[in-house]
Image: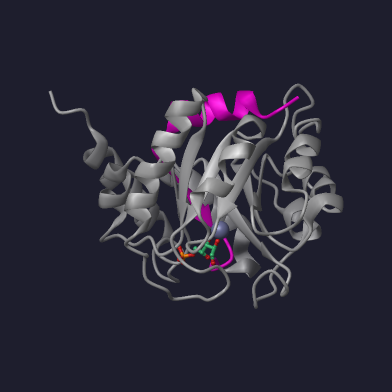
Amino acid sequence: MAGGSIRDRLRELAPTISVGVLTADLLSLGTELALLEEAGARLIHVDVMDGCFCPAMTVGPPFIKAIKTSLLKDVHLMIEQPLGKVGDYVAAGADMVTVHVEAGRHIHRVLQVLGTMTNANDSSRGVLRGLAVNPGTPLETVRPLLSELEMVTLLAVNPGWSGQRFIVSTQQRLQELWAMIHRAGRDILVAVDGGVTKENVGDIAQMGADIIVTGSAVFDGKAPKENAEFMLRTISAATQVKG
Ligand code: DX5
Ligand code: ZN
């Protein structure tokens, strides 16, 4: 039961943002998420880090389970050896689970297992399977996995360190990835994650990203709703088909 129906829903919404919640006011997360909904955001992005795959440690399944929202939960696992762990995130209510191609010996198996899982929020659908690739990892590693996923995410920063700038070579990698997906004849969403700002979000949308992950540029401690509205407006304007 792969995540085809979620992919189809995201295809309708794309290009759109997936908002990183770890820079939100976590003591008022319900209020913060309501502001995102009012702004028209439809996805929240939860960065799970285990302190082994990358230096930082963040949250786990209990945090995801505690989030009560109608927004789609896009869970980015920056964890080592995810095979025996992904089930906990699905049970906690993840709608989308992204694992790193660098995270273990059996990533094809992880994606196969994810493809059999039922969405805890809606038993009629599966979980969307994502594969994330660090900036230094050759895209060739993705090719053998294309038949076992619904989304590929290009990291535009090195995961685990905050305040980084968008890595410019991501644009070339996006084009290479699109060509690979097109040659494979598969319906796969492409996401970009990291270093997204109000200044570059329009350019990134024009590069062809379906899902643009942005955290601190929305939850900046000042005006998350207005920031999210700005991002969505900018993406829409940047991708309007010229009449
Ligand atoms: C890598 C994470 C990203 C990152 C995004 O560290 O996968 O989601 O935190 O955060 P911003 O948008 O603040 O760069
Ligand atoms: Zn992320």
User: Going by the image, does 48 lie left or right of 42?
Assistant: right
Taking depth in this image into account, of 172 and 64 the one nearest to the observer is 172
Residue range in magenta is: 1-24
- Residue 178's image quarter? top left
Taking depth in this image into account, of 154 and 125 the one nearest to the observer is 154
In the rendered image, residue 78, in percent from the top left (x then y), is placed at 66, 62
The residue depicted at 71 percent of the width and 44 percent of the height is 94
In the rendered image, residue 243, in percent from the top left (x then y), is placed at 12, 23
Q: Quadrant of the N terminus?
A: top right
User: Going by the image, does 190 lie left or right of 98?
Assistant: left
The residue depicted at 45 percent of the width and 35 percent of the height is 180
In the rendered image, residue 177, in percent from the top left (x then y), is placed at 43, 42
Furthest residue to the right?
84
The residue depicted at 70 percent of the width and 52 percent of the height is 67
- Residue 144's image quarter? top right
The correct choice, above or below, for 98 with respect to 188 in the image is below
